[in-house]
Image: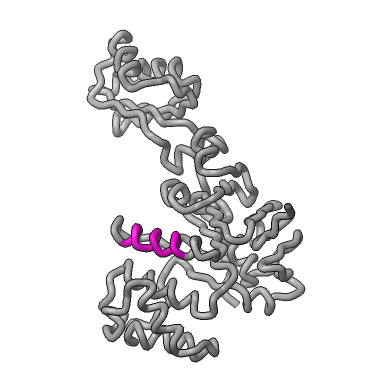
Amino acid sequence: MTTTYAVLSEGLQKRYGEVQALRGLDLAVPEGTVCGVLGPNGAGKTTAVRVLTTLARPDSGSARVAGCDVVRDPAGVRERIAVAGQYASVDGDLTGAENLRLFARLLRAPRSRADELLERFGLAGAADRPARTYSGGMRRRLDLAASLVTRPRVLFLDEPTTGLDPRSRNEIWDAVRGLASQGTTVLLTTQYLEEADQLADEIVLVDEGRAAQRGTPAELKALIGHYAEVVVADASFLDAAAAVLDRLTGSAPLLDAGRRTVGAVTTDTTLTLPRIVREADAAGVHLVDASLRPPTLDEVFLRLTGRAPRPEPQEAAA
């Protein structure tokens, strides 16, 4: 069977002055799936979205979205996609219903589409309230509903849960799952490993404008492993604790003298927390705490790239 790709890019490059934001980015997102583009600030995620949504022109390379070339047919791309950015773009002085009806009118969609989306996103009860009175999660759901007025084939979500509390984040996750279950292709950029794990069929880890690693959430987590961390009673134990974790994990430990912590990534599935505690005790290291957990994004990034992230350049306003 031949896979049909909703988003397909090859060798995308984009420079802002002296900084190369994209360095040959390749993406292939099958129709009807959720692709999580994962990476910290500065990795190139937002620049990739700008290029794929025709807001920025690539310097070289090619990309097709919903079957249309982003350079040769930008109007065709825009007719087939929707974008929800990091911050809600709805008008706070209008009610929820007025916001969606305005979008429907501007986009020549039936008025009934607004009412349908209010119900679908659990906002019907607040439809007549000004959007400024909505919680952060409600505003993001309203923004997401607005992006779906035209029934787009591809939805770009650029860090949709930034700044939201856990409850609001879960509301957005539920909304995205609902879209995916109905066949909408979603390209989700995020800084949160948990978010990509919850929502994505495939994760692409972006580093310095390239796809550094890709795979299903299970494949990526297996590649990354776990993070072992200990908190010592006194800074004088840091070096000895680092030696213990170096021996147990086989990777260079990270020391934080201020927090009196030592951590290291491991792919050893047999390593257990009791073993870490026993080995530390045998080495004369006095521990206050110890943990063995999935890594954070910063730890994943450091493990796979060997460096800390850098801020992403912003395109100058015209």
Quarter of image, res 239? top left
Which residue occupies the extreme top position in the image? Answer: 282
| Residue 171 is one of the magenta-drawn residues | yes
On screen, residue 267 versus residue 262, left or right, reads right
247 and 165: which is toward the camera = 165
Range of the magenta residues? Answer: 168-178
* Above/below status of 137 relative to 311: below
Specify the quadrant that holds the C terminus: bottom right
Q: Is residue 43 magenta?
A: no
Using the rendered view, name the quadrant where residue 59 is placed: bottom right
Q: How is the image coloured?
A: one colour
Q: Position of residue 191 (x, y in %)?
A: 46, 52
Please, what is the dominant secondary structure of the magenta stretch?
helix
Query: Could you tell me residue 5's position as x and y percent?
Result: 68, 59
Q: Find residue 48 and report its horizontal and vertical position in percent.
A: 61, 60
Quadrant position of residue 174: bottom left
Residue at image coords 61%, 48%: 208
Instruction: Compare residues 157 and 283 and report the one nearer the observer.
Output: 157
Residue at horizontal 32 percent and vertical 76 percent from the top: 123
The residue lying toward the viewer, choosing from 233 and 33, is 33
Q: Residue at x 71, y 68 (%)?
A: 67
Q: Position of residue 126 (x, y in %)?
A: 27, 79
- Work out which residue is located at the far front of the displayed protein and give it: 1
Residue at position x 51%, y 59% from top? 188
